[in-house]
Amino acid sequence: MNMKHTCTGLPLEVRYVHLFNIDDFSVPKAAVWNNKDCIKSRCTVDGYDWEIRFYPAHHTFATTRYLVALELAFAGEASRRCRVTATLTGRLVDYQSCCLRPIEGARTASQAFKGPSDPTLLVYIGSGRDHAHSLKTPRSLTVECTVGVNILAARSPVFMAEFFGAMAERNAERVEIQDIDPAAFEAMLCFIYTDMLPNEVDKQQAEAGTVMLQHLLVAADRYGLDRLKVICEERLSLGIDIETAASTLALAERHNCLGLKADCVEFIARRSAKNLDAVMETEGYKQLEAISPSVLTELLKAANGRKRKSSDSN
């Protein structure tokens, strides 16, 4: 396949913003609360359930002070192959301003979650001075909480490594993707965000549609998207014909698609001698000879098996 490279800006996060507005709040009253006193709020972000806990006065053992704190707990289940990475940001808000002007000093932390038993994510917000600033409107405290879930990392273990591992793209604002068909990459992103293939994939005719699915299967295998890979395998199996059988077989061999490979061998060698002869004349078969010579042995064995069955029946 003639691969290209593409450079694209990716909308990385789904965000949920929640305002905690505590009436009848004062610093002395908050100081007598303990770490078990909290206000809870449930939310769903990117299909996962979360619980946000707001502590007006959470005791910090490191500083022996009571600070406003936010805690994020994962209430869902991540996929088998990768964790869900969430970012929690909290900041005090000046309730005196009509537009809820944020006070400087936002705190942010990130953590990868697998299941509800994982440790929670805790963020401390501000100091006593910040509290005093936020209380210009008497006896009221407003805290803005933002939960961000990285969509791509939640779906793909490869994107997880790229954005949150030791790979170079971790802190990059722009990511360059090489050796992948741009249209297939766009279709893969559509699947990641919507769990569906774009309509353009279905509308493409015969060979062009097969080529797109081949590129998409390569992308799915590269980024660890097992469900998308299975969908591509199934559709390619249904669309096997003389022109695409050899190239699809080479692809199945290279990406360990055993079911798709078996279907290609069945079509080429076992159904009729005419199919084998016709496929051998295609450009795809020449490429198959060059990159996967071992597959040719399997085709010959399958063809011989078909001949023996034919002679036995006679």
Image: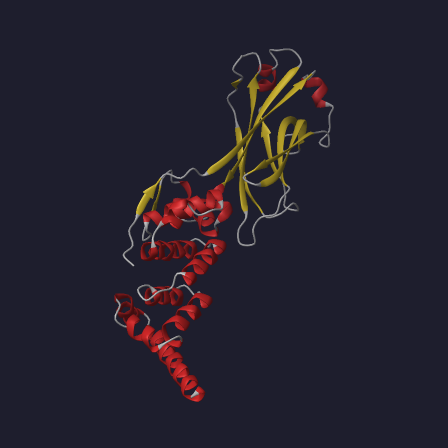
Position of residue 6 measured from the top left corner of the image (x, y, whole percent): 31, 46
Q: Describe residue 57's horizontal placement relative to residue 207 as left or right.
A: right
Position of residue 268 measured from the top left corner of the image (x, y, whole percent): 36, 72
Q: Quadrant of residue 133?
A: top right
Q: Quadrant of residue 92?
A: top right
Q: Quadrant of the N terminus?
A: bottom left
Q: Residue at x 30, y 64 (%)?
A: 243
Q: Height in image: 27 above or below 297? A: above
Q: Height in image: 148 above or below 307? A: above
Q: Foreground: 109 or 230? A: 230
Q: Residue at x 49, y 56 (%)?
A: 226
Q: Foreground: 276 or 52? A: 276
Q: Quadrant of the C terminus?
A: bottom left
Color scheme of the displayed model: secondary structure
Q: Describe residue 260's horizontal placement relative to residue 209 as left or right.
A: right
Q: Foreground: 253 or 244? A: 244
Q: Residue at x 34, y 47 (%)?
A: 183
